[in-house]
Amino acid sequence: MSTDTAPAATGHARIPAQRLAAWRAFLEAHARVTDVLGRELREQVQLPLAWYDVLVHLQEADGHRLRMQELAEAVLLSKSGLTRLVDRMESEGLVQRAACPDDRRGTFAELTPQGLQMLRSTAPTHLRGVDEHFTSLLEDDEVEVLIRALDRIASRARGTDTTA
């Protein structure tokens, strides 16, 4: 077997080894960095990384609230997974649900004052970790290349890529 391409699946072209190595490096970097960031949040401020992600998205949203479906898409969870997560966060007073006035079936998740305070108190820990384990390891010229490449990949996966 050649070392410069991955084995071909039936009917599929071979992937050059260097591109497959990029894929594997991306997967490993993502898994390891999110694991470290999650562990640091749990150990230092007793907050799961998924909860922090929800708090950030709600804080950034207009009125500090999002429809549950929009929040699920933002934090990359299924609707049922988000429902369970919001249930736990609501029981801790970090978020609350509110009916959508123009859609009886719609529900918003809203950031509570307690949730905003939690976000403010945990952000320094998380941002320090993001810098230590990710941003500080990038050279200035790598940042723009990485942004363009990952935005293009995410756009294609979302089905919003206009370059296809």
Image (cartoon, grey):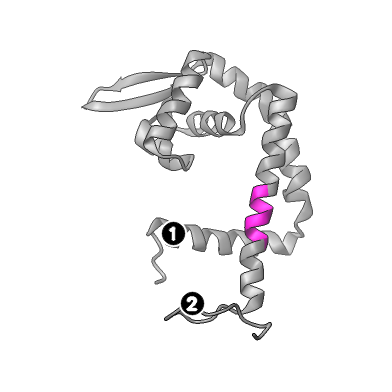
Residue 74 in sight = yes
Locate residue 114 relative to residue 137 in the image: left or right.
Answer: left
**Mark 1 surroundings within 10 Å by alpha-carbon count, few (fewer than 14), some (14 through 19), many (20 or more):** few
Quarter of the figure with the C terminus? bottom left
Residue 128 x/y as whole percent? 75, 37
* Residue 20 vertical position relative to residue 60 in the rendered view, above or below: below
Query: Callout 2: helix, strand or loop?
Result: loop
Residue 42 image label: none
* Amino acid bearing label 1: Ala
Query: Callout 1: helix, strand or loop?
Result: helix
* Residue 63 vertical position relative to residue 73 in the rendered view, above or below: above
Specify the segment rendered in magenta.
25-31
Magenta span has 30? yes
The residue nearer to you, when weighing 114 against 34, is: 34
Residue 36 x/y as whole percent? 72, 40
Which quadrant holds residue 148?
A: bottom right
Identify the main secondary structure in magenta. Answer: helix
Residue found at x 68% / y 22%: 46
Residue found at x 65% / y 67%: 22
Which residue is identified by label 2?
9
Q: Are marks 1 and 2 in contact (CB under 8 Å)?
A: no
Which residue is identified by label 1?
157
* Residue 95 vertical position relative to residue 7 in the rendered view, above or below: above
